[in-house]
Amino acid sequence: MTVAGQTLFEKIWNSHVVASPEGEPTLLYIDLHLVHEVTSPQAFDGLRLNGRRVRRPDRTLATADHNVPTDPISTPVKDPVSRRQLEALEENCHEFGITVFPRGHENQGIVHIIGPELGVTQPGMTIVCGDSHTSTHGAFGALAFGIGTSEVEHVLATQTLPQQKAKTMAVTLRGKAPAGVSAKDIVLAIVGRLGTGGGAGHVLEYRGEAITDLSMEGRMTVCNMSIEAGARAGLVAVDETTIDYLRGRPGVPEGEAFERLADHWRTMVSDDDAVFDEEIVIEASELVPYVTWGTNPAQVVALDGVVPSPDEYDDPDEKNSTERSLAYMGLTPGETIRSIPVDVVFIGSCTNARIEDLRAAAAVAQNHHVATNVRALVVPGSHRVKRQAEVEGLDEIFLAAGFEWREPGCSMCLGMNPDQLGQGQRCASTSNRNFEGRQGRGGRTHLVSPVVAAATAILGRFASPEDVLA
Amino acid sequence: MKPVRVIEGRAVPLERSDVDTDQIIPSDWLKRVERTGFGRGLFSEWRDDPGFVLNDQRYVGANILVAGPRFGTGSSREHAVWALMDYGFAAVVAPSFGDIFRTNSSKQGLVIVQLAQDDVDELTRLVTQDSTRLVMIDVEQLKVEVPETGWQRTFVLDPMIRERLLNGWDDIGLTMRREASITAYEGRSTAPTVDGVFDEAGHVIAH
């Protein structure tokens, strides 16, 4: 029975309350805990120190992703500190009985790519991971959020988390997005509008035609960057697109059992009369391709635009941070975005390394060549994505166009592995964060969609697919 | 976690907004499997700059960090909290914080003091004028003061977080008191597990 007037968030929240003691946070049950090598070793150590076990290994799944090199799998991990961390993940998972996909495993990949593609991410679930981009899984109508290592330990030990209930915000995209505007552009527009703190304390539910028109891959791109607006999580209601994506995946049953499950999933929508704490409306028809110009993901400008000036801001704090960002980025106010040359192009990350992203980028790259002096990397999000791309011949298109075709991992999104920018290098990146030093010390990151990244690689400066054909 | 009642010390003004956790502790430091030693990596990309405030001799030994809005946004890395505490910080004062950073801080005993922008500006001015000024943060009374000047403000903490800070309680231990409720919940939950999806080597078991 559906209780009238509930948002999707409230439905999931209410069905996962273990206890709500007076004067204490609600204890929330966690259906799926995804684990990776970087935020877990100290948590496993904590369990050992206190003689605790993992309560539900069957609700826990681990993969190596953050620090794995993207060199051929046959090459050993050269960095001893990275190697030790990867070994620790495997040892810990074996000790505590958790399924783990180490480097090179057929199911290994970026944690937020493999959950959905294996079908273990399902509507109505609560999902956590020691990574802020866990919000990605919200595309399936699951409440998914990032946690710190203490909370990782807490979930391992108890399969629950004490939580204060978040507020809800409807983010409504009114109308259709114009052709050439991708999911990445939609979310860059949303983050630009909300700012880096605008979503704080809230769970965002993305709604409207421009959202429901998106594939699951596109919805994941949008939900992925919820955290960049400061939100705890992002959600998209379940529809037939969701169900069609999950049908036949390893983690779901087949036949009649699947259809019964799908009927339950179809209830994972906000009721028509549900009330959100806040709502923002964005006219989808006004959206265009975007590029970030600064050092936080809300510093967004149209690809057709120019680098902004600190004089555009009245608030002294914003003026000051704009000046700092421009200095770090080595940009001059008024420069046209299309005139800015890049050194590196990175196509990858939990934001944009799914098969659809690679298809879109390959379509732009086909029969063209990466500009001289540009290094362009394609890092598939998982081995499954990589194998699928190779079946479709995308690897050959990229290689013929002068892109590197690498092994899966988080790679240059956060530069924990050897894929890093050098001092002052400028990168067009399909990842999610343009923070100072994120992709390598002194590196300058501009966030873009996969098609803008591919076009930029070919022309050596920021460009759209149309510019490549012109 | 050690109990925290009153923090007394000097404060260092960072005067930057949007200090994300990548800036607090760059990813190069995240490869380590230990929980200690992260203080050396704190703000490491800025510390080469002799003009950076943490390199200012007047602020050496300060244990309270005063920062701009949206401190600790971005990555969920708890290493940011470990780095701040390992360096010697016991509290951060700012107009706003990233949600995950705030939670991570509460688990480690790093005290988060959220004040209005004007109050943060005022505190910044007071400790910039005279870096030797004593600042006190009282977790029990929920107030922050610069006794020498009479400046005093109250702040808000989640009551449960305050209790845990004051008593040094272990979160997991607290939750384990709810064992019966967790087991009862599990008895009625129909949410799928990964059991039967993968074999011991992590390969998908054919349906």
Image (spheres, coloured by chain):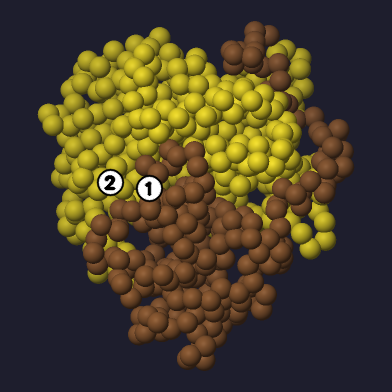
Determine the CA span between mark 1 and mark 2. 9 Å
Return the residue at label 2: A441
Q: B39 above or below B7?
A: above
Residue A30 lies left or right of residue A375; in this view the side is right
Color of chain A here? Answer: yellow
The amino acid sitting under disc 2 is: Arg
Color of chain B here? Answer: brown
Q: How crowded is mark 1: few (under 14 residues within 10 Å), some or many (20 or more)?
A: many
Residue A89 % position (x, y): 54, 29
Task: Tell me the residue at 52%/66% (across/down).
Answer: B90
Residue A273 % position (x, y): 72, 51
Report in which chain the residue with disc 1 lies. B
Q: Do the residues labelled 1 and 2 touch (CB within 8 Å)?
A: yes
Viewer-proximal residue among B62 and A156: B62
Viewer-proximal residue among A129 and A459: A129
Task: Tell me the residue at 66%/27% (across/down).
Answer: A96
- Quadrant location of the N terminus of chain B? bottom right
Tell me which corner region of the image, top left, top right, bottom left or bottom right, holds residue A423.
top left
Return the residue at label 1: B26
In the structure shown, which secondary structural element does the residue marked by tag 1 occupy?
Answer: loop
Residue B194 % position (x, y): 68, 23
In this orientation, does residue A1 appear?
no
Rendered image: mark on residue B121 = none
Q: A24 above or below A244?
A: below
Viewer-proximal residue among B123 and A225: B123
Residue B93 % position (x, y): 49, 70
Tell me which corner region of the image, top left, top right, bottom left or bottom right, holds residue A25.
bottom right
Residue A40 lies left or right of residue A156; in this view the side is left
